[in-house]
Image (cartoon, grey):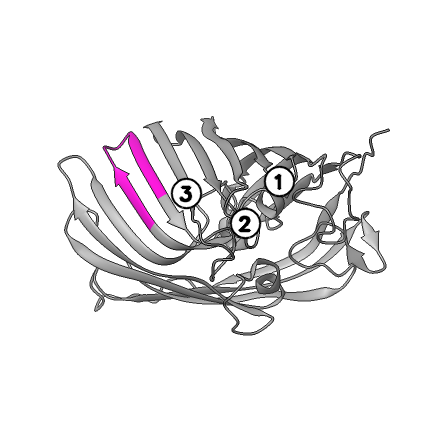
Amino acid sequence: MPRLRSHVAVFAFALILITGSIANAQLTSDSPRISGFVETSAQHSSADRSGFIVGSLYGQRQDQFSLNAFEIGIDRPIALDRAMAGFTARLLYGASATGIHAAGLDIGPQADLVQAFVTLNRPTRSGSVQLSAGKFASIMGLEVIESPLNPNLSVGNQFIFLEDFTHVGVDASWSINPIWAIRLAVFNGWDLAVDNNTAKTVMGRLTWTPQSGTSVALLGYAGPERAGNDGDLRTGGEILATTLLGPTTVTAQFDAGSEDGIEAKFWGAGLWWTIPVGGAGTLASRGDVLDDADGARTSGVLGYPALDGSGSRVSLRPSTITRPPA
């Protein structure tokens, strides 16, 4: 008989401080800019196991306050209308860094250099081409590592289990025109600062933006992710669509993938909607579902028990929160 497991996580309290960009009238568009944030929270969940919230990436301790993150970054932004070079570096410290830490980059158990890359930009007649090299945040999904940039302060199943957090390699993007854009990344592997085999992973994305507030992105990836194994591939794809329904922004995301060697398949789907609430901020809700029947992405991870491939798991993670204006 298949096994059904559900997970519900609720943020009881969260405090976000966004320092923003340090800029004034003396700074030019070429000047480096410093930004960052601090995040602390307390959580309560029905999926509690001996004080540990099963399936939670950030703030894993039941009914405890947690210093989730302190991030500081420095950027030299790119001007898309001229040839120039820029860079980004972001250092994350706190409990959140432990969950997304890249293997092979040891700067402490609660620290991670989330991003550190250089970018060259060249404008074209109707867009621009950019080439970057270094360590990047993933190009997958709606949600990102920095909680203040997400619709919800908590992150969902797809971000935690079906996407890479960061990768090290090269990244090329081509904004063909205001409607179409292509992005291609070649890197060591999922969350690997140092490769665990001799082959590389390839990830590509095509984005269509017919009008402001509406977009559809198609993404695919392939590469060996098992240590010392260049033959067994992890492959998959993603559809990410966003549109406006009056003042409400609605986003849907679907992911599916497979892992060779262990003959495993997995998929997930999520729906987000955000509604402005006057000057009070934004009301954001999310509902998502993850099916990892063979345990490829969840077996023995973040408090989930190991699966031997004979069972199935469905994990649900509804979430609603009102956030203040940035």
Mark 1 is surrounded, within 10 Å at the Cα level, by few (under 14), some (14 to 19) or many (20 or more) other residues, namely few
Secondary structure under tag 1 reads loop
Residue at 43 percent of width and 49 percent of height = 200
- Please report the bounds of the magenta region as a residue range: 171-184
Could you tell me how far apart the alpha carbons at marks 2 and 3 are, in whole angstroms? Answer: 16 Å
Amino acid type, mark 2: Asn
Mark 2 is surrounded, within 10 Å at the Cα level, by few (under 14), some (14 to 19) or many (20 or more) other residues, namely some
What is the residue that sits farthest to the bottom in this orientation?
Answer: 108
State the residue position of label 2. Answer: 229
Tell me, yes or no, whether the two marked residues, 2 and 1, touch with CB atoms within 8 Å.
yes
Secondary structure under tag 3 reads strand
For marks 2 and 3 on the same chain, the one whose residue lies earlier in the sequence: 3
Q: What mark, if any, has residue 193 been given in the picture?
A: none
Residue 231 falls within the magenta-colored stretch: no
Q: Position of residue 65 (x, y in %)?
A: 71, 65
Q: Is residue 214 or residue 163 the one in the foreground? A: 163
State the residue position of label 1. Answer: 261
Q: Is residue 95 or residue 220 the one in the foreground? A: 220
Instruction: State left or right for residue 310 relative to residue 91.
Output: right
Q: Position of residue 133 (x, y in %)?
A: 32, 57
Could you tell me how far apart the alpha carbons at marks 2 and 1 are, in whole angstroms? Answer: 10 Å
Q: Is residue 135 above or below residue 8?
A: below
Q: What mark, if any, has residue 202 been given in the picture?
A: 3
Q: Is residue 18 above or below residue 121?
A: below
Q: Position of residue 17 (x, y in %)?
A: 52, 63
Secondary structure under tag 2 reads loop
